[in-house]
Image: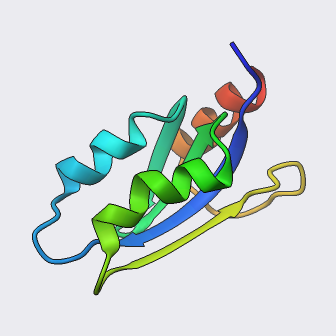
Amino acid sequence: MANGKFYHVFITPKTGVDLEAIKTQMNLALDWFKYDKNNWVLYSNASMDKLMTRFKPLVEPEGRLFICELNTSNRNGWMNKDFWEWLKKNRDK
């Protein structure tokens, strides 16, 4: 399996787009973790441009989208155990 990168994705979909439509696009990544209503961490080998192409139709014109590469080598926080296990699993790939 190709080495992926971690991305933080904040998405507020446009009217008419439901959670299943968002998950369909998230499932194109190698893995993902939804940690809050609008916040996800993706593990993907897709480029930033490819991710924008995937998610942009879910938010235009009145939704919101923010994607950034996530450096997980310097980390700390109070997340649930499932998140830490997911992060470790993907970091070890």
34 is higher (above) or lower (below) than 13: above
Instruction: Name the outermost residue toward the left.
Output: 16
64 is higher (above) or lower (below) than 3: below
Judge whether residue 36 can be spotted in this image: no
Instruction: Name the outermost residue toward the top.
Output: 1
37 is higher (above) or lower (below) than 3: below
Asked where in the image residue 90 lies, by quadrant, the reply is top right
Q: Quadrant of the C terminus?
A: top right
Residue 17 location in percent, x, y? 17, 64
| The one of 32 and 24 positioned closer to us in this rendering | 24
Judge whether residue 48 can be spotted in this image: yes
Which residue is painted at 40% across and 65% down in the image?
56
Side of 74 where 59 appears, left or right: left
Which residue is painted at 66% across and 26% down in the image?
89
Q: Quadrant of the N terminus?
A: top right
Side of 7 where 42 appears, left or right: left
Residue 19 location in percent, x, y? 21, 56
Side of 15 where 92 appears, left or right: right
Asked where in the image residue 43 lies, by quadrant, the reply is top right
